[in-house]
């Protein structure tokens, strides 16, 4: 998927919502337990209820890998279902990969060929040769971790370079721009770090940002949009628990749809205010 198609979907749906499919087998409603594949059954109903309001889905691989082979099968079925029913939706593998070049090449093959994701989250710590293999696929994306929303981000991401004085996350932003372009690279910036978005936009004004942390983690959608939006929106704002676990009962899909619509309506107003 190219950047112009993604922006067209944002304008068409009046939304820049990404729904995180962080499907925990222990939180799935009890009535799905007898299904042959409870995780996929849950995901399918969530997708059907929210697809009208979202432009992206983001399965977090940990929730699937924790179940072994069955979890991987659920992920495969989920990705295939989205591709079949909603091919216009941007599909992100939240895998946080990044390894030596030949290993990254195989990770890229897994997510871009075998599973046909549009994007994969990648950790930048091992440098350019660990990231470049993901960029050999046309219209596929790397989403590079830049400034995350967790407490431990302070351990390394704000450490300053002795020569430049730049914190590490700014060095990642500046250096990695030489690896890709606005057509194949996005960055993760946590919603709970929204006050940093103005600084980040000075460094990468035109890239898309994947922004987790809105909803259950307490990030402000309004603040993220005010500080991070650009002329092509430039934002995919993720909500996971606040949508997919809006109800633990048999009405879980209906409630998820209502929660997604509520976020989409706020995004619609934001886009209109921005003239997009």
Image (cartoon, rainbow, N blue to C red):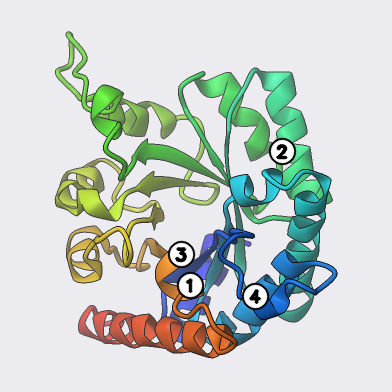
Q: Earlier in the sequence, mark 1 or mark 3?
A: 3
- In this view, the residue in front, 4 or 265, is 265
- Where residue 28 appears, as percent x and y from the top left, is 61, 69
- Where residue 129 appears, as percent x and y from the top left, is 59, 20
- In this view, the residue in front, 239 or 101, is 239
**How much space separates mark 1 and mark 4, taking CA atoms?**
13 Å
Which residue is the site of mark 3? 240
- Where residue 144 appears, as percent x and y from the top left, is 46, 39
Answer whether labels 3 and 4 touch (C-beta < 8 Å): no
Q: Earlier in the sequence, mark 2 or mark 1?
A: 2
Pointer 2 local density, CA inside 10 Å: few below 14, some 14–19, many at least 20: many
Q: Is residue 39 left or right of residue 12?
A: right
User: What residue do we see at 73% from left, 29% from top?
Assistant: 105
Answer whether labels 4 and 2 touch (C-beta < 8 Å): no
Mark 1 or 3, closer to the camera: 1
Whether residue 12 appears in this view of the structure is: no
Mark 4 or 2, closer to the camera: 4
What mark, if any, has residue 108 been given in the picture? Answer: 2
User: What residue do we see at 80% from left, 74% from top?
Assistant: 35
């Amino acid at each position: 998927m190219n950047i112009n198609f993604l922006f067209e979907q944002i304008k068409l749906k009046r939304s820049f919502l990404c729904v995180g499919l962080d499907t925990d087998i222990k939180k799935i409603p009890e009535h799905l337990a007898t299904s042959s594949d409870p995780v996929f059954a849950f995901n399918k109903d969530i997708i059907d209820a929210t697809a009208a309001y979202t432009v992206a889905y983001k399965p977090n691989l940990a929730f699937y890998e924790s179940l072994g082979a069955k979890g991987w099968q659920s992920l495969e079925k989920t990705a295939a279902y989205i591709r079949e029913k909603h091919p216009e939706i941007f599909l992100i593998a939240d895998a946080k990969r990044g390894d030596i070049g030949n290993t990254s090449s195989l990770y890229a093959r897994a997510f871009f060929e075998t599973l046909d994701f549009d994007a994969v989250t990648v950790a930048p710590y091992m440098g350019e040769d660990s990231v470049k293999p993901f960029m050999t696929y046309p219209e596929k994306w790397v989403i590079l971790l830049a400034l995350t929303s967790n407490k431990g981000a302070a351990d390394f991401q704000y450490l300053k370079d002795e020569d430049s004085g730049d914190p590490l996350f700014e060095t990642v932003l500046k250096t990695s721009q030489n690896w890709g372009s606005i057509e194949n690279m996005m960055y993760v910036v946590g919603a709970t770090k929204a006050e940093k978005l103005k600084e980040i936009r000075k460094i990468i004004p035109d890239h898309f940002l994947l922004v987790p942390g809105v909803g259950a983690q307490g990030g402000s959608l309004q603040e993220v949009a005010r500080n991070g939006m650009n002329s092509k929106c430039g934002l995919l704002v993720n909500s996971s628990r606040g949508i997919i676990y809006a109800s633990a009962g048999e009405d879980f899909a209906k409630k998820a749809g209502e929660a997604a619509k509520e976020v989409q309506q706020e995004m619609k107003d934001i886009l209109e205010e921005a003239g997009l």
